[in-house]
Image (cartoon, grey):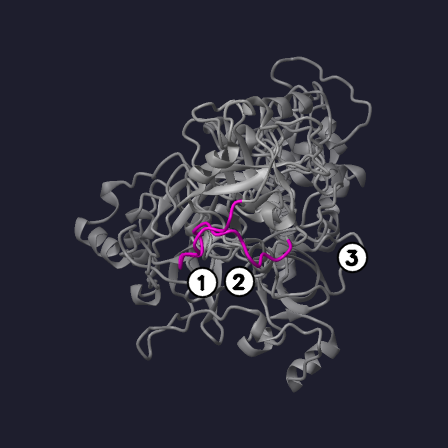
Amino acid sequence: MDGSYKEDIKPFDVSQDPLRLPVPLDDPPSPVMVKRNRSELANTYEWKCQLSEPGFIAAPVSCFSHAPLADCWENITVGMKVEVENTDCDDFTESFPDSFWVATVLRISGYKALLRYEGFGQNCSKDFWVSLCSNSVHPVGWCATRGKPLIPPKTIEDKYKDWKEFLVKRLTGARTLPSNFYNKVTDSLVSRFRCGLNLEVVDKNRISQVKVATVRKIVGKRLHVCYYNAEPDDNGFWCHEDSPLIHPVGWASRVGQTIDAPEEYLQRCEEGTWGENDATDEYFHVPQPSSCPLGVSFQEGMKLEAIDPLNLSAICVATVMKVLRENYVMIRIDSYDEDASGSDWFCYHASSPCIFPAGFCDVNSIPLTPPKGHEPREFDWTTYLEKSNLTTAPLILFNREIPAHGFVVGMRLEAADLMDPRLVCVGTVSRVVGRLLKIHFDGWEEEYDQWLDCESPDMYPVGWCDLVGHKLEGPRTPSTKALAAAGKTPKGVKKKPRRRHKKGKGSPSGVGPHKKNPGNSSTAARTEITRAAGMSANSKTNGSSSEHMLREPAQATKLAASDSSADGLPKEGSNGLPGPGREPEMGQEPAGPDQSLPVSSEPSNGQQPPIPRERTATSYINSTGASGKVIPRLVDATGSVGEPGELIPAEWNVFDVAQFLRVNDCAAYCDSFSRRKIDGKALLTLTKDQIIDLTGMKVGPSLKIYDLIQQLKIKINPAQERMKASFKKL
């Protein structure tokens, strides 16, 4: 045989099983797969280097109910035969392949499959990974219907004299892809939404309200929405079409939620008149109705536990602040300073899997972030409730169904970074608690982890980004650290969870459950709380997909402040490549008694930092030299300034102000303050509106910085500030 075999095998008997191997008699043309913008996908991560690693396990496609082909992926099995491009031949070109061969599926990881050409036996030298959904993989018989030749690989072309007989033996009784497989792929990628539709979305700058927005772009059912009346440089944000963060037009007025919208829109909501570009109820999944007995519902003031929407690695003590219609409630995380305006409340549906009864964390050995002013290791629900005369939300209000989701610890996947939702990153399931999953972003510290529901639409199978044409951010590697050390500025970085303070937060994620003092409560009382929680991994919960607040993607310049070490150089582990690459900010976790004291701006090692070409906040922070000025840490309200004369903020320069922000967990705003030349005198006179402008309209951080300034004034002259405060009350 000359090595070229044109498929002329007669069709096998057609079985009732659609995956048995007949030659497709009426196979439609392969659909045109996603057209990817090369500039957008530059430096996208490829899984190939990890797929063959020992112990690599990808979460099966069937685990992701919202993913393409999830409902039929269990029929795609190891041992299936496919026709694929033959790259082991002379003059192969990827653009115009003219030779194909049959291959066997050896392994499946997400949408990726390890293939081996037929005829290689146990020889793995030409094995290769490919996406089964790509247009280079076809059902057996595809070549015959198109007159394309089946050419055996060059490496083994002389192994058999009669390749036709060999293939007949290998293919008889085998399974292949259904003939309409690529039609199914295409259909599964079609979004319910379209560009130009109006909807209501959680306002990223004020999470307690929604705002009218318009769909501008759709990639793999992920919507890029742009807010009404947004600034020209506002990037909007990304979310999946099944996200609980988006709602139909008129939703806010229907349930009683606050909304930012034009008058014309509000008028239409009152009249109930919608246009062709309004996304109405049929575009959205309806949350499950309450199954609670009549008269049992959430009430204002009830206590519970909830995932912090601004720090998804933390589960915190929370309070029901307001009850809306249609089983929606407004929740406040108690570990933050209370905002009288309610701007830090967040809307959850009563069936949300992201809210839990009191005691849930204790039962499942999850660190719980207590209310502000309480120590994590000493907090006890029973004692807290008795002293405060408070009540918890009844257990019956929390649905407890746990679906057979199939996720286990160690599974790999792709997940949206909900602190910067334009990014989809390489991740690993690091913990499973019932239906709750802890997702770890590979190469990153545990404080970047995210608690997600098993049905969250923000998780995807391995190969999803490649399938839909979305950029995938890879894990942080030593090479990215080296580039960062060379001074290259990251183009895209992972954001830290929003944290307004660290005092009163739970122990760092992943360290392990905090231990309570046995003397804090009686055994009987603790048993009662444990019984009330009742939501261990063995109990049943039920609810909608996880609800998380997102925030605007950061510009690289805003992040420079956190990417330097004490010597003025980029910290080891900071990133110089596009994609995630940012180390945690210094001074955020009190590591010992010394960190609750004022921080001197004098470098501890006595070395002068090098002078950078461009003076940014990064260099300001580490360029105070031997000035000896005291820069207090006030974020925990435990800082001591020593002698009264040592703290003189009015003499601070721009460098010192940046240092003040840094040691008080506000490093992300150092550059903004530095560019505006905010020195000590200017800092002390800033108003709330001016601070909001400096932080880019971020309400939470602005209030924190304003509070820090007020604390600073009191440190300078306590009596004078108390007198001013008393005058304001008159």
- In the rendered structure, the answer to whether residue 722 lies left or right of residue 296 reads right
Q: Check whether the beta carbons of the residues at disc 1 and disc 2 lie within 8 A of each other.
A: yes
Q: Look at the image and tell me whether residue 371 can be seen.
A: no
Which of pointers 1 and 3 lies earlier in the amino acid sequence? 3
Q: Which residues are magenta?
A: 9-29
Q: Check whether the beta carbons of the residues at disc 2 and disc 3 lie within 8 A of each other.
A: no
Which of pointers 2 and 3 lies earlier in the amino acid sequence? 3
- In the rendered structure, the answer to whether residue 458 lies left or right of residue 514 reads right
Q: Is 135 rendered above or below residue 584?
A: below
Principal SS element in the magenta part?
loop
- Residue receiving disc 3: 231
In three-dimensional space, the C-alpha distance between marks 1 and 3, rounded to whole angstroms, equals 32 Å
Q: Nearer the viewer, residue 245 or 149?
A: 149
In three-dimensional space, the C-alpha distance between marks 2 and 3, rounded to whole angstroms, equals 25 Å
- Residue receiving disc 2: 244
Of all residues shown, which one is farthest toward the bottom? 271
* Crowding at mark 3 (Cα within 10 Å: few <14, some 14-19, many 20+): few
- Quadrant that contains the N terminus: top right
In the picture, the disc for residue 544 is 1
Q: Is 23 rendered above or below residue 492?
A: below
Q: Nearer the viewer, mark 2 or mark 3?
A: 2
Q: Residue at x 33, y 52 (%)?
A: 360
Magenta-colored stretch includes residue 24:
yes
Magenta-colored stretch includes residue 145:
no
Q: Position of residue 99 (x, y in %)?
A: 64, 36
Q: Residue at x 51, y 27 (%)?
A: 161
Mark 3: amino acid: Glu
Mark 1: amino acid: Ser
Describe the element under mark 3 as helix, strand or loop. Answer: loop
Q: Position of residue 235 (x, y in %)?
A: 72, 52
* Crowding at mark 2 (Cα within 10 Å: few <14, some 14-19, many 20+): many
In three-dimensional space, the C-alpha distance between marks 1 and 2, rounded to whole angstroms, equals 8 Å
